[in-house]
Image: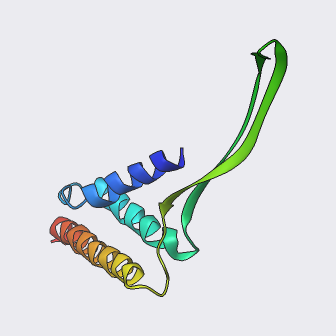
């Protein structure tokens, strides 16, 4: 579900670059870009899954039970706050926000004047 949430945010945020003539989608794009910008600030975006499997059966005439428990971590986005990739992530999304904002205010000013 978390991956679907990020996909929807990405479509809204980056798709709004193409929907600059539609104010509602542009406003949703500004919100989505802000959320995507702030997502890795607190740390890596990781989905943790836990599993518990139990198999019973027989092998060579004796009963066998196999229990398997554990967890997996799926890393969606991991940026080092001290690295250049984090800086690129931040400044790229700030540039996209500036483009969105200029487009939105252009639509507003056209409606006013």
Q: Is residue 71 left or right of residue 76?
A: right
Quadrant the C terminus occupies: bottom left
Residue 91 image position (x, y, % from top left):
33, 81
Q: Is residue 97 left or right of residue 69?
A: left
Residue situated furthest top in the rendering: 61
Q: Quadrant of residue 93?
A: bottom left
Residue 40 image position (x, y, % from top left):
50, 71
From what the image shows, is residue 58 above or below residue 88?
above
Residue at the (37%, 85%) spot, across then down: 84
Front-most of residues 63 and 69: 63
Residue 107 image position (x, y, % from top left):
20, 66
Residue at the (23%, 73%) spot, across then down: 99
Q: How is the image coloured?
A: rainbow
Q: Is residue 54 left or right of residue 14?
A: right
Residue 88 image position (x, y, % from top left):
33, 80
Residue situated furthest bottom in the rendering: 82
Residue at the (41%, 63%) spot, across then down: 31
Q: Is residue 50 left or right of residue 31?
A: right
From what the image shows, is residue 64 above or below residue 69?
above
Front-most of residues 51 and 82: 51
From what the image shows, is residue 26 above or below residue 62?
below
Quadrant the N terminus occupies: top right
Front-most of residues 25 and 69: 69
Residue situated furthest right in the rendering: 63
Q: How many marks?
A: 0
Front-most of residues 49 and 70: 70
Residue at the (37%, 57%) spot, across then down: 28
């Amino acid at each position: 579900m978390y991956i679907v949430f990020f996909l929807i945010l990405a479509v809204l945020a980056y798709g709004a670059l193409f929907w600059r003539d539609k104010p509602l989608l542009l406003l949703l794009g500004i919100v989505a870009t802000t959320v995507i910008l702030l997502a890795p600030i607190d740390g890596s975006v990781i989905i943790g899954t836990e599993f518990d499997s139990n198999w019973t059966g027989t092998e060579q005439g004796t009963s066998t039970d196999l229990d398997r428990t554990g967890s997996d971590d799926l890393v969606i986005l991991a940026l080092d706050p001290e690295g250049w990739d984090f800086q690129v992530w931040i400044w790229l999304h700030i540039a996209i926000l500036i483009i969105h904002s200029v487009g939105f205010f252009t639509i507003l000013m056209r409606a006013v004047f």
